[in-house]
Image (cartoon, rainbow, N blue to C red):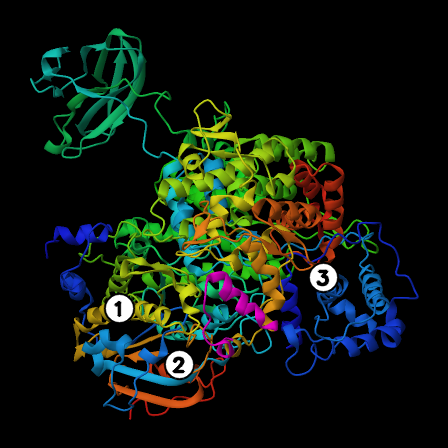
Amino acid sequence: MNSQPISRRTVLRGLGTAVALPWLEAMAPVAAVAGQAPSKSPLRMAFFYVPNGVHMPAWKPEKTGTGFDLPAILQPLAKHKDNLLVISGLAQDKGRANGDGPGDHARALGSFLTGAQPFKTDGANIRLGVSVDQVAAEHVGKHTRLPSLELGIDRGPQSGNCDSGYSCVYSANISWRNETMPMSKEINPRLVFERLFGGDSDESSSTGSAAARRRKYRLSVLDYVDEDARRLAQRLGSADKRKLDEYMTAVRDIETRITRLETPTERPRSSAAAPSYPRPTGIPTDYQQHVRLMADLLALAFQGDVTRVATFMFANEGSNRSYSFIDVPEGHHDLSHHGNDDAKQAKIQKINTFHTQLFGYFLDRLASVKEGDGTILDHSMIVYGSGIGDGNRHNHDDLPVLLVGKGNGTIRSGRHIEYDQETPMNNLYLSMLERVGIAREKLGDSNGRLSNLDS
Amino acid sequence: MSITHAAAIAIAFACLAAPARGQEAPKPAAAPISGNMAYKDRIRPLLDRYCLGCHSGEKPKADLDLAKFNDGDSVFKGLETWELVLDYVESGEMPPKDKPQPSAMEREAIVAWITAQLAQVDCTKSNPGRVTMRRLNKVEYNNTVRDLLAVDIRAGDDFPSDDVGYGFDNIGDVLTLPPILMEKYLAAAQKIAELAIVTDEPSAGPIAAVEGSKIKAEPGATVAPDGSIVFASNSTAKLEFQAPKAGDYIFRVRAFAQQAGTETARMGLVRDGKPLRAFRVDAVDGATFPYEHKIRLPEGKVSLGVAFLNDYYNEKAPAEKRDRNLLVEKIEIQGPAETEVRNLPRSHRQIMIPRKPGATESEYRRAILENLAYRAFRRTPTPDELDRLAGLATMVQKDGGRFEEGIQLALQAILVSPHFLFKVEVDRRPRNPAVDLAFPISDFELATRLSYFLWSSMPDRELLDLARDKKLSDEKVLLAQVKRMIADRKSNQFVENFAGQWLQLRNLENIQPDKKQFPEFDESLRSAMQKEAEMFFSTIMKEDRSILEFLDANWTVVNARLARFYGIPFSRNGGTAIREQYRKVDLPDDRRGGILTMASTLTVTSNPTRTSPVKRGKWVLEQLLGTPPPPPPPNVPELEDQEGKLTGTLRQKMEQHRANPNCAVCHSKLDPLGFGLENFDAVGKWRDKDAGAPIDPSGELPGGKRFAGPKELRNILLERKDDFSRCLTEKMLTYALGRGLEYKDKCVVDQITATLARQDHKFQVLVTEIVKSDPFRKRNAKGRD
């Protein structure tokens, strides 16, 4: 067992200042647990989102192909250049008004993983489309204890309307299970940890007869409430029934999860054993520590094969967060309407670069864990990007997009590819789904797959 | 796109953008000016001439395509749009000044026709709409668990954020239930049930083993120093026990027997020479069993004894079947037992109601579950529900669990049941289906609406019992309950949740003013700002003051810190104490007054490093006047490219922006309101200069109204009190119902605002009028919404 350096714990409580050790090194026990060596390494998928677009002149490499350059915002990823695929030219058309008027921020996030036009409403009839991560989760999720993991930093807005007549639901949720069901994100590292590795009351936290009895009781409770719901459904109108359907779907989801634990042949390979990673105590007040902690947890989840699919939001779309700790005290959204002011653009670039640094930290974690014939990063496909190009123009074409990781040898990374303008972003997703064994022909507004990711 | 398009406009005008029209009794449409004929002959030609140039075609201005309205009836498919058109044409804002203007008569004709057409919304017919079944949000969940079980662990804090719609987080359509939330409900239910109900045995008290020296045996029995006794033949061994105090004791004999003959060995327990109880001792060597008898003892000495009752000896039998003996390993006296005086938590005592004398265990279980489910489901539970809950509880007992553990599991099921998590309203038939669209919701459902409206929590027993007795729907009873509820401490939840969202105070915690520019801003100031607004609201509510005081007042509520920040005098004895440290004080000048000039609202509408006149203007229009500007044009990017770089001071830059007529449409409404508040910096502190230059807080609103500074701006808002009271009515009705308002709600809103105006705009009139209204007390039948 590794001993825990005190400074680590302090950092986790949000009190420390710097992190010296690569945190994953201390996590050997998980590797031991997870190391029931699979014949082939599982392929992971994650989607990282940054709001308000990026300063494109400092993002887009001038050269394409393997000899591509790394502009300032991508510099922090230099170490991972070989694993980097910079993809230019993609558009998310459904982020555009298409007759719906203003609301580019809500649409940028809403469309980002769905390729669907959010229905413009402040409440009634919320409708979007299934997101790529959830399509993947539905298929590969059965191999892991959690089908997918939705992470973020900002909680949902507390009041007010978020963007020109769009409910806040669109600017706070990147992952959609179906047209009407956003997958709420978890922002509290303590709760993420408990979900991944079992809290005190988790149904899968241990084996033995006590745990079996707990599972039995939990299933009885679920049976009871399912019966309640079925009887109730007969007495309700259609809108209410839809709400109850959500309820029943959630009940079945968890039933399935518990039942799988009871069946040895179907039991997920992942272990619920908590790693020697210190249990987080809550939400760090420091943004950078918060992001790093979440990145660590996601890396742990991939490492222990607790899940293979994840989303991560650096902030809600339209976020006006102040980054005063890197000398950018202005609000992010406020700045992003830079009006071509050089000083403002420089500050935007600073925020963008800070985000890629943090992203680089996550990549470091994945690259540091050996697995089978390579590292976890080799066995991953990590998308990083925004649904807006330039924050000032609110454009939804030529988006900033990275695809990182070798996808189990199916992606020839270390390149900059420029696709024709207006190539649907969702074509990329179809290509990714194909790589995890999902032969889907259409997702949102896709019109094909991206060619030459592997050639 | 047409549906989306119409919806977009509807939404942008969520506060039904209408000056108080139609307050007069609804009248049937006047034939000559309304209808299809009039539209075709007189109105459409006017629209063609003055409006369709911009508002039609591929890319209609403001995304408003009037060409698609081909006949008069089509107005009914776009009522909100026409309400909007009416506003613009009537106020003269449209057509724009640089475009051909209709004559006064033409303008009047358009206005009259639209008004007549809109008046056909029939206010004589009740059309309360349908509220989509709402689940409890995080706040409501926490409060409900606290009030139901007296357990305050705020499990809801760990749930994912509730999404917001129409400005509030209690909207049924928006509150979804993803699997992660169900996961959390289950975990929370288990944790809560374990906290609420104590399952360990009451302690039976200290155990004393009796030493051999204290035991006196008759012949036939032998006592060893360790207290063990061998009974070779029938005899009694006695001891004297000194009970330290009166109470329940356990007289326990750990024994086994060597068996012989046909009978099992028998052992008797004796008190003061009288037999207490006899046991068959079937335990054998190596498996000593504790034989116990409960005795109630007074304080003082008592004589206890153990007797062997059926000695047996048969020398002809084989050795192992020859001799029956009783062997006592140890005698223990345990006690006194803790009685019910032990410190059980209130939650436990509340759930484990006293058992009726003579009630069987199963009757008792049912009584407990009935009492619990009545409050948790906010209605009388059905026998079937009780059967199923009892089934869960007995299953646990069959597995060897205790009675209380069974109740725990039933409680878990209750806490995850849709009847607990949702505010269920079941469908009924209207009393007269041929005429009525709607039916009154049940008294229980009404109690639930009421308590989540004013307390963000479950109904208390008084409300539930009134509902059960079908008295709550009686208007007099209902209104008395509203008064009681407002006076109750729990109405602070209405302040935190309604005012917190209406005024957007909740966003204050996410605002990060630049520390360098605003060193004064810290957590204690943030908290004082928020409390000021909440207590101000609460004072108006509890003292039943006029809602117009929100727009301007000569008093506010501050603590020492905020008073210093505002630069107003504060003393521990001045004003009226509201809560610890906070006092209601008179304002010394007219710089501030009402919610518009509070540090909280001014900070929430600013950026971290600067004020935002646009955000402030938008806040006034949306939250106070209910007349949001038309949204910015969808093609903003090109516009910004045209502009190039803006230069000069903030106000100058904004004026350049407004020089573009596309921008001016909105910004001539937004910006002046914000300029009027420029004396307040980004954390709401008074300033006379910005970056060295004097502040110019004057402005001119569309229509030519001028003001010189914040006081005059407030006066102008006060002149628009009808708009304000309509807007507040709409916000509160949205919150009370948990749904967005629709066009058909206009009748109710009209009626409430009219009543408010007649009754001095008193706050509690607004609340009671909402509670009395059809949308609050009724529900459209299935398929009639």
- Please, which residue is most extreme toward the left here? B225
Quadrant location of the C terminus of chain B in the rendered image? bottom right
Residue type, mark 1 in image: Phe
Q: Which residues are magenta?
A: B640-661
Are the two marked residues, 3 and 2, in contact with CB atoms closer than 8 angstroms?
A: no
Image quadrant of residue B399?
A: top left
Q: Secondary structure at mark 2?
A: helix
Q: How many marks?
A: 3
- Distance from Cα at disc 2 to Cα at disc 1: 20 Å
Image position of A392 (left or right of B328)? right
x 26%, y 68%: residue: A302
Is residue B431 covered in magenta?
Answer: no
Q: CB atoms at circles 3 and 1 under 8 Å apart? A: no
User: Looking at this rendering, what residue extends furthest in the top direction?
Assistant: B300
* Between discs 2 and 1, the one toward the N terminus: 1
Considering the numbered disc 3 on the image, is that residue within a helix, a strand or a loop? loop
Chain of the residue under label 2: A
Does residue A437 sit above or below A325 in this rendering?
below
Q: Amino acid at mark 2?
A: Tyr
Q: Is residue B765 above or below residue A183?
A: above
Task: For residue A406, say whether it is visible.
Answer: no
What is the x, y in percent for residue A454?
A: 29, 90
Q: Which residue is mark 2?
A: A429
Residue picked out by circle 1: A302
- Which of the 4 image quarters holds residue B90? bottom right
In the structure shown, which secondary structural element does the residue marked by tag 1 occupy?
helix
- The chain containing the residue under callout 1 comes to A
Say whether residue B89 is left or right of residue B59. Answer: right
List x then y, in percent, for residue A347: 33, 68
B242, above or below A299, in the image: above
